[in-house]
Image: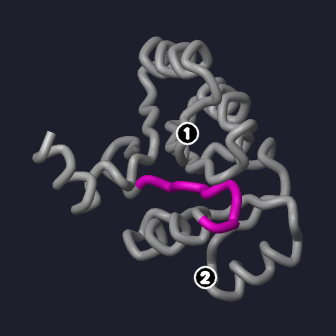
Amino acid sequence: MTKGKRMARIVVAGCGHWGKNLIRNFHACGHLYGICDNNPDTLAEFSARYPGIRTFQQFGQVLADEEVDAVALATPAELHYAMAMEAMDAGKDVFVEKPLALNAADGREMVQKARSAGLMLMVGHLLRYHPAVLKMREMI
């Protein structure tokens, strides 16, 4: 998710359960550029916790910001496809919390769009590396 040699500038869209974890981790890595949420109280809370980050109340503002390299979507699953496609149309790399899409056809279209645009598209698969899952895989 880097453009050139500078640190990637990532905006996390959605500050709920998974979003707050992404925000914390991207901030710890020095990549958190901003957060996007439609709730102004939520934005104020996270802005106080992470001084200096930008806040966006509308996703279109994120996409219009040329300083943003990538977006991490921690929004309701039914929004993943549309938001990821919009982000890639704007030239942004995209990380999508699981699920990538609600159906395989949309997922394939997203992957094709990323490939044709030369963009990175990633999906969160946290449990893939969980010790219990690894043990089950070993047993199978």
Residue 5 percent coordinates (x, y): 31, 49
Residue 10 percent coordinates (x, y): 53, 55
Of 137 and 57, the residue lying toward us: 137
Give the side of residue 17 with respect to residue 7, left or right: right
Whether residue 87 is visible to the viewer of this picture, yes or no, is yes
On residue 99, which mark appears? 1
Residue at the extreme front? 139
What range is drawn magenta here?
A: 8-17
Of 24 and 128, the residue lying toward us: 128
Give the side of residue 89 with respect to residue 98, left or right: right
On residue 50, which mark appears? 2
Tell me the quarter of the image containing the N terminus. Answer: top left
Question: Which residue is found at the position 31% from the left and 49% from the top?
Answer: 128
| Amino acid of disc 1 | Pro
Q: Secondary structure at mark 1?
A: loop
Question: Which residue is found at the position 55% from the left and 68% from the top?
Answer: 23
Q: Point out the frontmost of discs 1 and 2.
A: 1
Q: Could you say which quadrant of the image residue 7 lies in?
A: bottom left
Of 11 and 22, the residue lying toward us: 22
Question: Which residue is found at the position 50% from the left and 74% from the top?
Answer: 24
